[in-house]
Amino acid sequence: MRSHFDQRVNRMGTYCTQWDFIQDRFGVNDLLPFSISDMDFQSPPEILEALKERTNHGVFGYTRWNHTDYKSSITYWYETRFGANIEMDWIVYSPSVIYSIARLIEILTSEADHIVMQTPAYDAFFPLIREMKRKLVSNPLLLKEGSYEIDFTDLEHKLSDPKAKVFLLCNPHNPTGRLWTKPELTRIVDLCKRYGVKVISDDIHMDITYHQRTYLPMTSVANDAEHIFICSSASKTFNTPGLGGSYAIIANEDIRERFLRLLKGRDGVSSANIFGEIAVIEGYRRSGYWVDELCSYLYNNMKIIKEYIATELPILQFTIPESTYLAWIDCTGVLKTQKELQHALVHTGKVGIMPGDVYGEDRGVFLRMNVGCPQSKLLEGLERLKSSVLYMKR
């Protein structure tokens, strides 16, 4: 049966980063893109209708976020989707998840302090830590039989350093798609508590999960949430990053007040984007069914990749992730460097797929392919990947 997610929406000419500005990332502009992590799907109809209604009102003045409608939609979502108890007072608005992480690092650490982080990792983390003059300390994930595991021995060693002040977690993990289990999260919390290290968790991919698995926020495994800081957004879930806005969950009242002083007093962020705010409320209150349908469609996309690689490109390795719409493909068997693979993808296959070394993965040749798209586009992209690999193996 045809899904509404099968519809191909022309995004060209909309100032779209993934389509209109692909040359900025790959050097040429005639590529089929599977790069930046937004989706090619229209947002839920409930959000679209609410935005139309607000647009028809015609007045777009300054907007407050600190009210029950906005914050209760977030607590409702966490309670109904994850069984998590989040207090409304803990919630603060932020322009973006990266902004929240930066301000929390600024509050919790000083220059030259260590930020411990699992690698590979979301690429924006690297320049953020560098520009804030903190030291990134890598805790490389272990790849075992196609799945990534935490090296807890190495993690404890890194956390035990007196200079370690923050552990920066990605839950679920970008780019590998690991959805951390309760035992794993509990062990992280215990280690961080033992060594006095705060936890900042980027949870923006939390709603995209597979295999009947459910995201678990760090606050649900910690007896004391005072040292846990969750940064998230509805934008990945409902495909609304262009509307702006995110939120942080900060149980620690002192840290929360300091965050708000920086947000408004120093950085001048006192008003939220009304459209982003409406998208959060309508998405979290009325669009849960749409997220369920989305996850089912994305999982089928992952199965398509798995089957295609097994039959057409067995030299590559791919394991369906537990979460995210990002396929992490092991191309080490191509026996070429990341640079050579990218050249073939761009100039032979005419396809834009993110190289693994962007995410700090230097132990092989990997690709991060965004599968948040109609299946027809995905199949076309896989054919282009195949032509690139065959060109390299000729």
Image: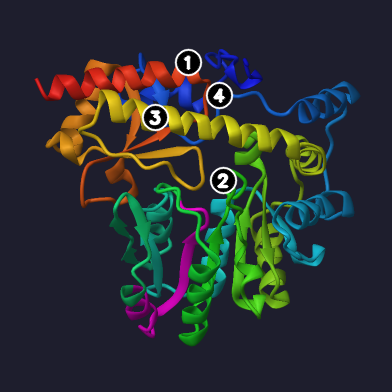
At which x and y percent is residue 354?
35, 35
The numbered disc on residue 376 is: 1
Query: Is label 4 or label 3 in front?
Result: 3
Q: Amino acid at mark 3?
A: Ile
Q: Is residue 61 above or below residue 179?
A: above
Q: CA distance from mark 4 to mark 1?
A: 12 Å
Q: CA distance from mark 2 to mark 1?
A: 22 Å
**Looking at the rendering, which quadrant does residue 51 occupy?**
top right
- Quarter of the C terminus within the rendering: top left
The answer to whether residue 243 is visible is no
Instruction: Decide if residue 169 is on the left or right side of residue 212.
Output: left
Instruction: Decide if residue 180 is on the left or right side of residue 239.
Output: left
In magenta segment, residue 164? yes
Q: What residue occupies the far left of the structure in this picture?
A: 394
Q: Amino acid at mark 2?
A: Thr
**Looking at the rendering, which quadrant does residue 89 occupy?**
bottom right
The magenta span reads 155-173
Q: CA distance from mark 3 to mark 2?
A: 17 Å
Query: Is label 4 or label 2 in front?
Result: 2
In magenta segment, residue 345? no
Residue at point 13% right, 35% down?
336
Residue matched to label 3: 305
Residue matched to label 2: 209
Disc 4 residue crowd, few under 14, some 14–19, many 20+, Cα 10 Å: many
